[in-house]
Image (spheres, coloured by chain):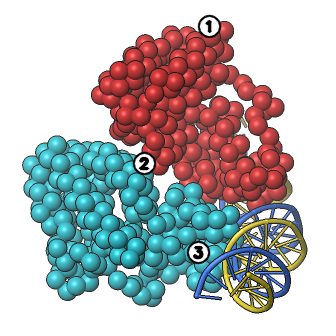
Chain colours: A cyan, B red, C blue, D yellow
Amino acid sequence: MAVHVSELGNIDRAAENLGDAAYRQMKERIIRGVYRPGHKLTVRAVAQELDVSTTPARDAINRLASEAALVYAGPKTVVVPILDAKALQEITLIRLALEGLAAQQAAEHVVPEDVKALRSLQKQINSALDAGRYADALWHNKEFHFAIFRLAKLPHLVSMIETLWLRIGPSLHDLYPEFAKERFGVHNHEVAMEALEERDGASVRAAMENDIRDGYRRLRRACRERATASAQ
Amino acid sequence: MAVHVSELGNIDRAAENLGDAAYRQMKERIIRGVYRPGHKLTVRAVAQELDVSTTPARDAINRLASEAALVYAGPKTVVVPILDAKALQEITLIRLALEGLAAQQAAEHVVPEDVKALRSLQKQINSALDAGRYADALWHNKEFHFAIFRLAKLPHLVSMIETLWLRIGPSLHDLYPEFAKERFGVHNHEVAMEALEERDGASVRAAMENDIRDGYRRLRRACRERATASAQ
DNA sequence: TTTACAATTTTGTTGCAACAAAAATATCGG
DNA sequence: CCGATATTTTTGTTGCAACAAAATTGTAAA
């Protein structure tokens, strides 16, 4: 689960401004599951962690909060969100609409090389699962999905989907180890790749929607088990 | 077209922090068409305009830029976006997916009082159109649509839709005067309200999708006329 | 042990100055 | 008049200190 901070890209103090760099770093940490749901983030702590001053750290936190990747638990308390069942359901509903659209449009532009790249990503997912490296499996899974989304050539759409993944990322990492061994998504991914080869947009969409629904079902179950366990 | 700044709510220096207040103000100005596409915004100018220091002004600009309500035209130049045909088409595609979903879900929770409120909003649209107050008509039109979206009880979805309106808002105001007199949307709105009364989600969705497509067609035409006119 | 309250520490916000870089403007040659 | 270049001005960024407010810790009474 834990990801070593050293594995994350360092801040390049020249190419972009520090606020953007800090934002990118935080985003990667959130998606990689470095922070658990409920984790509290402070301007000064983030500044120290990323070795920048408070201004860029504050920029990054504010930006993530405005995207709902972080949420306010109090007037001076931003935390990694703990999704309840209702929020999880809403985000899933939006994911079905947006990712379904992206998947369908992907079929309009796909070329054989793209499918080859996808197969390579799927191999990485499989070997991570075999080795029990679930955090890596989740990361490669994310790359697989976004490789498809980018085929749609709709940049606004991709970035909107990204904010959704940012919101559910921490909960995924918090709950997934318990059932990642069930080899999530492998079948849906295979179907999606076949459909892409045939440029069958409706089938790509169906496969990706299935993948979202499967993940939702598992997350929901794990969420319930958590709730009953903590209630005792 | 022009909206007097005095009509916009002033910043309340107590309830919320200045950055949020500045953000809200700028958002309203953008949607109300105070700034035209291409307008350049600077930290110091916004600070002076809103009577705050540079820090909250910078916060607001950064936040709007990260939502693509403003875009970078150069490393130190943020402008109100000028949408090209491709961007307009992409945003319309996303709007169809998200607003269609919201419209359909609205039918699940609507009560008779909601439809009454919608009819009242529609009256305001009509009288604004009659009086030639097109900016007001656009504003009430926006309120009509969001009154429906809010019925869906899906706050994440509503805020995502809001970012889309923020992106097209300036272009709408820039192009609409030329054909607002055609009484946009009246029929679609009537159909939507009838479908809401019958709690017929599919029909609400269809009506709202029609409205989006109608608006898109007109915007696209106006966009083309602009392009050919400026090419001469 | 738990609850309510007081003391203390931590925290986000705000404004500002300095700096480097970019944009705007002026200048000049054709 | 136009285009390229040099100059001036404007601009975003960054770091920081002060402040008020919130969160935390400590304390004591029940």
Q: Are marks 1 and 2 on the same chain?
A: no
State the residue position of label 2. A156
- Disc 3 and disc 2 on one polypeptide chain: yes
Residue B89, x across and y down, in percent: 39, 35
Distance of mark 1 from mark 3, alpha carbons? 53 Å
Instruction: Identify the residue shown where x is 16% and y is 83%.
Output: A130
Q: Residues within 10 Å of mark 2 (few under 14, many from 20)?
A: some
Q: Position of residue B75 (x, y in %)?
A: 61, 58
Kind of residue at disc 3: Leu
Dot 1: chain letter: B
Residue A10 visible to the viewer: yes
The answer to whether residue B152 is above or below residue A118 is above
Q: Mark 2 belongs to which amino acid?
A: His
**Residue B175: horizontal and vertical position, in percent?**
56, 24
Q: Which residue is mark 1?
A: B130
How far apart are the alpha carbons under marks 1 and 2?
A: 36 Å
